[in-house]
Amino acid sequence: MASSCENPENTESFLRKRRGNPLVSDSLSHDRCSETAQDEDANKYEKTVCVSIQTGTYWLTRIALLRAIAFIYLVAFTVAYNQNKQLIGEKGLMPCKDYLRSVKRYVGGKIGAAALAYTPSVLWLMDWTDMDANLDGIALAGMALSGFVLFMGSANMIIMGTLWILYHSIVNVGQLWYSFGWESQLLETGFLGIFLCPLWSLSQMPRLCPPSRISIWTFRWLIVRIMLGAGLIKIRGDRCWTDLTCMDYHYETQPVPNPVSYYMHHSPWWIHRFETLSNHFIELVVPFFTFMGRRMCLVNGVLQILFQVVLIISGNLSFLNWLTIVPSLACFDDAALAFLFRRSGGARKTLLKIQSEEAAGHGPPATRGVLIRRVLNVSVGLLIAYLSVPVVMNLLSSRQVMNTSFDPLRIVNTYGAFGSITKERTEVVFQGTMSVNHTGEDVIWEEYEFLCKPGALDRRPCLISPYHYRLDWLMWFAALQTYEQSEWVIHIAGRLLANDSTILSLMAHNPFQDREKPRWVRGEHFRYKFTRPGSISAAQGKWWIRKRIGPYFPPVSLDGLRNYFQSRNWPLPDSE
């Protein structure tokens, strides 16, 4: 139990003054001391009483969960605000207006229940004249609401429900750019967060709405499924997970390495074996600690959080690992989390008062609202159990799929990560030239730089987690495929040929800035490897070495892309 002393004075002096008084009970030597004065002398010294926070309640846990969910929402909406216009806006690579129009045609040409069921989004109800303004408005509203919850440490069902709807509205029109497992995981986490809160009250400690144990267990069930899904997909997937060699490659070949990835990649082989074994233990064994009583549940929470912290340190995996910490917090009760709250703070004092009242049998009356809330909590628990059936069947299946939703609202989903590990890192490098003839011997090709993904050999890997550059992440996948499989790469090339400011805002370096636009752009395919510490390349300040594989796509010009763009209903790039 966590104990706290309110305005401590000299307790021994107090006991000496009370010596011989039969009203003094031996219970004064216990952890929990009486807050009820028996006489005037006791009233004078009651502030010396030391009171323990009892186990088994989740008032502080709720505050921690709400703040953690709000933090992830804030990051996600900030990413959306900064990047949605370039990716799915009016002049984006995949305009969401075109996507909504295609859905509308598919469901019969009307915006009704069928359209909302197929693509749940408030954008259906908004004016499409300025879609950029709509996307910015949704993102800004989400940032404001999540910032409020993060600052206050409290929320109600209205706020949390609104955040869930707003992020749903973005994800469901985000297409390729929002096609990753952490989007569904945030929506599921956000949905569970709705039922942590009272309906209207914004109090941190609403006395008539205690945290539901059912709600706490839905979060615990989430972390169990996340970890088991990740662990099972690994042992059923790439062989390197069973021969313990995956970590020999992971740090170098992950989508967006950071500076620490460089040093972890060069760790001794036996450390990589230990890392892989530890991964299997934490993902396949530790989740079952959740069901083995309070202490083992606490162990699970600690290990899961430490595991996620290591992953955060070792690479830029968006806000995925930060998000996975959130349900792990539900493994801790008030006594375990009390150290996060100031002893003189209102939340801690209120908790002590609530626990004292409940110990004395003075809990809140069972009003009609309280009874309705209990029914709601049970209903949510039954809903999660029902929607978990196909998820559990998927976990047990030898044909397990990861990061899949079985319902359009993504309330309960399957998860998994790195079921297969790439053994070599390849990159697509965009190059441009102002030469009229791209085949001439004197052609000078100049390289574009993305915001974070590897490019220039001497550029230090970035450190951005929990922030996320969606285009950089997708470029990693494009390098594993061909440009025919990732046609949006050619769309980018066309925009670069026009010096399009929308796309260039997602780039770190434009070699043709304040110059004449390039006449040709091409994509080159390279194999990248970390330099070895102590090598000549490392001494020259290089983080990477690379070897050309060949062309990724041939040199293209605006005139040559005209028919390509028209056949795909892409607007021709405007020169700027």
Image: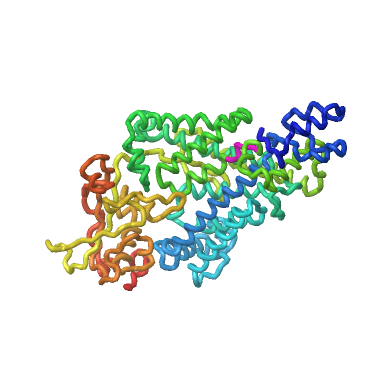
The residue that appears at 60% across and 42% down in the rendered structure is: 340
The picture quadrant where one finds residue 420 is: top left
**Residue situated in front as seen by the camera: 184 or 350:** 350
Q: For residue 541: magenta?
A: no
- Could you tell me residue 111's position as x and y percent? 56, 64
Is residue 460 visible to us here?
yes
Q: For residue 332: magenta?
A: yes
User: On screen, 345 above or below 3?
Assistant: below
User: On screen, 419 above or below 527?
Assistant: above
In screen coordinates, is 33 left or right of 84?
right
- Could you tell me residue 270's position as x and y percent? 35, 28
The residue range painted magenta reads 329-333
In screen coordinates, is 211 left or right of 392?
right
Is residue 386 visible to us here?
no
How many dots with numbers? 0
Please identify the quadrant where the N terminus is shown: top right
Coloring scheme used = rainbow
**Residue situated in front as seen by the camera: 322 or 193:** 322
Magenta stretch, main secondary structure class = helix
**Residue situated in front as seen by the camera: 296 or 381:** 296
